[in-house]
C-alpha cells in the first residue's frame, strides 16, 4: 500500500475535525472595516489552497495518459504542497512567516524527490522526471523531509490566525466574539479594541 493512501485520508480527517471549531469569523459586527481580516478566512484559504491543488494534481496524473497534462498536474500538486499552506499567512500580510515555510518545504521536496514513486506512485514520478531507483521509506532523507514537510504545513496553517491578528492590530482593528469563561453556561461576550 502506498504511503499516500494512508497520509491523505489522515490529513483530510484531521482538517475536517479542525474546521468546525473555526467556523465563526473573528471580525464581525457593525462598523467593521473592510481592511480588517478574519482568522478563520485565513485558515480556510490555506486549507483550500493546499488540498484542492493536491487533489486535482494527483487526479490529473492518475486519469490522463498525456505526458504534458500529467506534468502540469504534478506541478499543480507541488504548488499545493509548497505554497498552499502559506496562503493563509500571505492573506494576513505575514510574508516572512509564509515565505520561510514555503522555502522550508522546497528543501523538504528536494529531500523527498527520491521517494516520489513510493509516496505518490510511479506515474507521478515519471511526470516530474524524478526518482529512477527504489528507496526505503526508512531512509534518513525521507524521514527528515517528511517531518519538515508535514511540520511546516501544520505550522503555517495553524499560524494563519496569528498572522491575521498581527495585521489587524497593526492596522488598529481588533474585534472578536468570545464566550464568558468561568460560568456553567455559555454567554456571548463581544470585546472590541481600536487603537489610534
Image (spheres, rainbow, N blue to C red):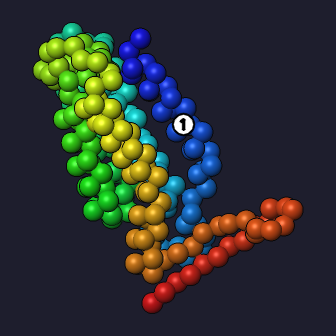
Residue 173 place in picture, x, y as percent: 48, 77
User: Residue at left 45%, top 76%?
Assistant: 169
Residue 58 place in picture, x, y as percent: 32, 22
**Direction from residue 15 to residue 89 in the image, left or right:** left
In the displayed structure, would residue 91 be above or below residue 145?
below
Residue at the right extreme of this rendering: 184
In the displayed structure, would residue 40 be above or below residue 14?
below
Q: What element carries label 1?
A: helix
Q: Would you say residue 123 is visible in this rendering?
A: no
Query: To which quarter of the image does residue 171 belong?
Result: bottom left
**Direction from residue 50 to residue 37 in the image, left or right:** right
**Label 1: how many residues lie within 10 Å, few (<14), some (14-19) or many (20+)?**
few
User: Residue at left 39%, top 51%?
Assistant: 156
Quadrant assignment for the N terminus: top left
Residue 48 place in picture, x, y as percent: 42, 41
User: Residue at left 25%, top 32%?
Assistant: 141
Foreground residue, 121 or 127? Answer: 121
- Provide the residue designation for mark 1: 14
Query: To which quarter of the image does residue 186 belong?
Result: bottom right
**Direction from residue 161 to residue 73 in the image, left or right:** left
Amino acid at each position: 500500500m502506498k504511503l499516500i493512501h494512508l497520509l491523505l485520508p489522515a490529513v483530510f480527517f484531521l482538517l475536517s475535525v479542525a474546521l468546525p471549531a473555526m467556523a465563526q469569523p473573528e471580525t464581525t459586527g457593525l462598523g467593521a472595516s473592510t481592511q480588517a481580516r478574519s482568522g478563520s478566512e485565513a485558515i480556510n484559504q490555506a486549507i483550500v489552497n493546499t488540498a484542492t491543488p493536491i487533489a486535482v494534481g494527483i487526479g490529473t496524473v492518475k486519469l490522463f495518459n498525456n505526458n504534458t497534462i500529467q506534468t502540469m498536474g504534478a506541478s499543480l500538486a507541488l504548488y499545493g504542497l509548497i505554497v498552499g499552506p502559506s496562503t493563509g499567512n500571505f492573506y494576513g500580510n505575514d510574508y516572512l512567516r509564509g515565505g520561510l515555510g514555503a522555502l522550508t518545504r522546497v528543501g523538504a521536496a528536494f529531500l523527498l524527490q527520491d521517494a516520489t514513486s513510493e509516496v505518490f506512485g510511479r506515474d507521478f514520478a515519471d511526470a516530474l522526471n524524478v526518482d529512477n531507483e527504489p528507496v526505503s521509506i526508512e531512509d534518513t532523507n525521507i524521514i527528515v523531509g517528511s517531518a519538515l514537510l508535514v511540520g511546516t504545513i501544520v505550522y503555517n496553517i495553524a499560524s494563519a490566525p496569528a498572522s491575521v491578528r498581527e495585521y489587524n492590530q497593526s492596522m488598529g482593528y481588533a474585534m472578536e466574539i468570545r464566550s464568558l469563561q468561568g460560568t456553567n453556561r455559555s454567554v456571548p461576550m463581544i470585546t472590541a479594541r481600536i487603537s489610534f
